[in-house]
Image (cartoon, rainbow, N blue to C red):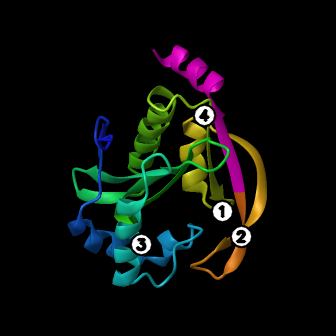
Amino acid sequence: MMFPELKTNRLTLRQFQQDDLEPICEYISNFEVSKMLTVVPYPYTKADGEWWLNHIRETPQNEATNWVIESEHGFSGVIGIRIPEDGFPRIGYWLGQPFWGKGYMSEATEAVVNYCFEVLGSTKVTSGAFEENDGSLNVLAKNGFQMIGSQPEKSRARGEEVTLINVELTRHLWEAMRAVTV
């Protein structure tokens, strides 16, 4: 199966390459980034980055797809979908701190949501963010995701539980939003 490269106005969502290791490690080693993620350790080592690159190479696309978010500045972050047992793609992402506040993540999320509905034929897409992560919650709200609940979730970087806000976007709502913007 060919890798599904996605393009937006300002971004290319592309497959990982070995030379992405350095920027991955540089940006995710920032506690401001890693503290908002569930499974990412802090500090983040080169071995962690190598493990991640091997993991995504070995994971079949029908289980997970991960993209590098490339802007005019080069490697800017990561967005991916994981297909859990319920079959509904779950979006996760992070952006290097120098690229916060530019709208990149809203743009990348929209492209991946469209991919889930148009290419994968999903009926629902899910995601989540820690309750104090206003930036991420705004990205999800901008893309039409609705809050469906919350739960305690461990942040590996922090070594403690944090409240995770769970959200979903149904195909019905996505189609209604697209009808308004077209």
- Where does residue 160 sit, x and y in percent of width and height? 69, 79
**Residue under the point 56% across and 67% down:** 37
On residue 162, the disc is 2
Q: Quadrant of residue 49?
A: bottom left
On residue 28, the disc is 3
**Residue under the point 47% across and 45% down:** 62
Q: Which residues are magenta?
A: 165-182
On residue 144, the disc is 4
Looking at the rendered image, the disc whose residue lies closer to the viewer, 2 or 1, is 2
In the rendered view, would you say 43 is above or below 134? below
Tell which circle, 2 or 4, labels the residue nearer the N-terminal end. Answer: 4
In the rendered view, would you say 108 is above or below 118? below
Side (left or right) of 49 relative to 172:
left
- Where does residue 3 sit, x and y in percent of width and height? 31, 44
Gap between marks 4 and 3 measured at Cα = 27 Å
Query: What's the residue type where badge 4 is placed?
Result: Gly
Gap between marks 2 and 4 measured at Cα = 24 Å
What is the secondary structure assignment of the residue under circle 4?
loop
Gap between marks 1 and 3 measured at Cα = 18 Å
Tag 1 residue: 132
